[in-house]
């Protein structure tokens, strides 16, 4: 099928209409109808080729929320009609030591979504279904995307640090990542930078 998207065709260029042909999903692949897609500064880095890994034309977007519309024969954990989220990873080998430990992000064969193919600034996205995750009904589509990038980054850090209920946590800096920690942990205290701003921000999240 022909997928319509927005792509940067050269380094640092503005996004333009762009279309490409995508095969029907086979094996573990799935086709997702994009409902919403956030924007992360990593998308801008990729558009500008700041990391030297960009391939043009590049369709950015790795905070994708969408509806599964087609699946390959080996897909069993999601089904057509499910609402799913997709983050930075497109696929990994899933057989190396890191993958078997649940650290697919450390796999030598990891494929980043927008570094190895088109991303979510399009009407559809085809990718490895094993990196598409069901989104709970209680999370709205238009706010869920950042949880697949900045959200999982800070959640993973808290989890690996052994943080749990009742523990006090300090967040140094309230930027794109830090504010997500505040959003779901009102007991977290922001630290550093503008103390007055931090206190106001903390009170705001406690009220939410």
Image: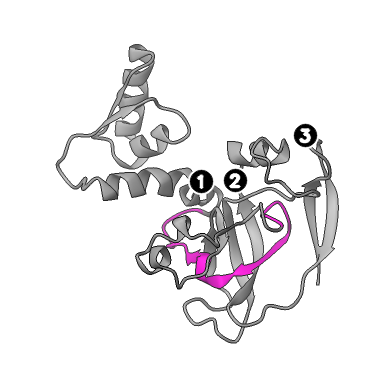
Can you say whether 56 is above or below 107 in the image? Answer: above
* Residue 71 x/y as whole percent: 62, 79
The label nearer to you, 3 versus 2, is: 3
Location of mark 2 (residue): 38
Mark 3 residue crowding within 10 angstroms, few (<14) / some (14–19) / many (20+): some
* Residue 69 x/y as whole percent: 65, 74
Q: Which residues are magenta?
A: 118-140
Q: Is residue 132 magenta?
A: yes
Mark 1 residue crowding within 10 angstroms, few (<14) / some (14–19) / many (20+): many
Location of mark 3 (residue): 12
Q: Toward the viewer: 83 or 124?
A: 124
Q: How many marks?
A: 3
The label nearer to you, 3 versus 1, is: 3
Can you say whether 21 is above or below 56 in the image? Answer: below
Quarter residue 33 falls in? bottom right
Task: Measure the alpha-carbon separation of dots 2 and 1.
Answer: 6 Å
Left or right of 118: which side holds 182?
A: left
* Residue 23 x/y as whole percent: 76, 75
- Secondary structure, mark 1, is helix
Q: Is residue 150 magenta?
A: no
């Amino acid at each position: 099928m022909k997928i319509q998207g927005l792509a940067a065709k050269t380094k640092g260029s503005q996004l333009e209409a762009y279309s490409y042909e995508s095969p029907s999903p086979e094996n573990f692949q799935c086709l997702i109808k994009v409902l919403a897609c956030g924007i992360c500064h990593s998308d801008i880095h990729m558009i500008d080729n700041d990391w030297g890994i960009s391939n043009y034309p590049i369709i950015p977007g790795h905070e994708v929320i969408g509806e599964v519309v087609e699946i390959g024969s080996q897909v069993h954990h999601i089904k057509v009609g499910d609402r799913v989220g997709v983050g930075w990873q497109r696929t990994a080998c899933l057989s190396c030591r890191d993958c078997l430990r649940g650290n697919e992000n450390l796999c030598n064969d990891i494929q980043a979504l927008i570094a190895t193919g088109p991303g979510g600034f399009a009407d559809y996205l085809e990718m490895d279904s094993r990196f598409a995750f069901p989104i709970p009904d209680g999370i709205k589509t238009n706010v869920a995307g950042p949880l697949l990038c900045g959200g999982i980054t800070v959640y993973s850090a808290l989890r690996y640090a052994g943080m749990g209920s009742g523990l006090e946590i300090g967040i140094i800096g309230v930027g794109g990542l830090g504010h997500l920690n505040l959003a779901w942990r009102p007991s977290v205290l922001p630290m550093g930078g503008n103390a007055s701003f931090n206190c106001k921000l903390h009170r705001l999240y406690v009220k939410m």
